[in-house]
Image (cartoon, rainbow, N blue to C red):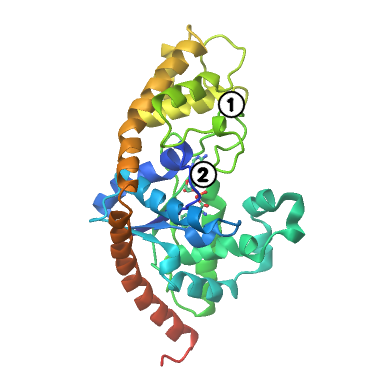
Amino acid sequence: MTRVLSGVQPTGNLHLGNYLGAIKNWVAMQEIHDCLYCIVDLHAITVPQNPGHLRNATRETAAAYIACGIDPKKSAIFHQSAVAEHSELAWILSTMTPLGWLNRMTQFKEKAGKHKDNSCLGLYSYPVLMAADILIYKATHVPVGEDQKQHLELARDIAGAFNRQYNQEYFPLPEPLILGDATRVMSLRDGTKKMSKSEESDNSRINLTDSPELIAKKIRKAKSDAEMGLSYDEKNRPEAANLINIYSAITGEKKKSITAKYAESGFAPFKRDLAEIVSEHLAPISSEINKLQADPAYLDSILKDGVEKARAIASANIKEIKDIIGFLTA
Ligand code: TYM
């Protein structure tokens, strides 16, 4: 059996990177796999969150999943904190994760920066909780953006460590699925930095709920370079490469054909067309998000169903895991 699990942090402002790198790829998987799409609120609190904002952002993320094409009848849409087995397994796995493995995680180094001693234990052990999110369902495939690759490798290592310790192939080693032409969408202000929710300038990203006018403005103002004509060169022209990747990921058109079209004309017409393509693609998603958000009771009922589906699998697995470890089952 194949099972897919993935998740997004409910920190508001879902952007084009979350969509093209992750959620867009989740949709087709519903046809072939058993899919669980989690809203990882326990991960969100590794940086302080306002309770009201967290509640809204959790519902907003559920709305975004549905608006992007996740069908609650086919997939479980649920929030992580409601399925306690995630945290329970995270503790168990933390006892099998050498500190050396966590010390290699580049995302912790980036997030903690120079303030390592003041950052919290949860931020450091975050990848163990992420491994638990996946392994509690014995998920086989995990569709994510490029930035999560290292965490996925760690999840495989942790699964292997458990299997070795208890001398059985209990956990499948989860496969990362990093798909499409925009696995790492970059900031519109700096083509060497990832597009991110936490970046201060809103002009650096396109949010799924931005209006067509705002999208056009952000793309018009996006950093470009002084070269005439469009060409794809990730190393020397990162901003152009990023915009071409976005164009290609949305239209499905090959990069070669895109650069051929704009080889003579330069950035202005390319950006104009790109703005139109992005706005047209996001308009129905954005209006569906707004519509769904106006009905929190409906969103809560979807989450409740999703939690039930997820809990049924997680509670059966945690029983087996506890038995393997030697915990008495009362
Ligand atoms: P998060 O919330 O930062 O991002 C959610 C998903 O969006 C992808 N993504 C991007 N893809 C391309 N370009 C970008 N600029 C970009 N920014 C974000 C991420 O790769 C991710 O797929 N730790 C995870 C959430 C998580 C998770 C899990 C994922 C927790 N448990 C278990 C999979 C399985 C995170 O912080 O994602």
Query: In percent of the image, x 31 and y 46: which residue is there?
Result: 292
Q: Where is residue 237 in the image (x, y as percent from the top left)?
A: 59, 22
Label 1 beta carbon within 8 A of ligand 1: no
Residue 279 sits above or below residue 34 on the image: above
* 195 lies left or right of 79: right
Type of residue at label 2?
Glu
* 251 lies left or right of 160: left
Query: In percent of the image, x 45 and y 21: which residue is there?
Result: 216
**Which residue occupies the foreground of this view, 124 or 215?**
215
Label 2 beta carbon within 8 A of ligand 1: yes
Residue where numbered disc 1 is placed? 238
User: Quadrant of the rendered structure where residue 175 is?
Assistant: bottom left
**Which residue occupies the foreground of this view, 287 or 160?**
287
**Which residue occupies the foreground of this view, 2 or 245?**
245
Residue where numbered disc 2 is placed? 146
Type of residue at label 1?
Pro
User: Quadrant of the rendered structure where residue 69 is?
Assistant: top left
Q: Position of residue 143 (x, y in %)?
A: 41, 50
Secondary structure beneath dot 2 equals helix
Query: In percent of the image, x 61 and y 27: which residue is there?
Result: 235
Query: In percent of the image, x 66 and y 65: which residue is there?
Result: 121
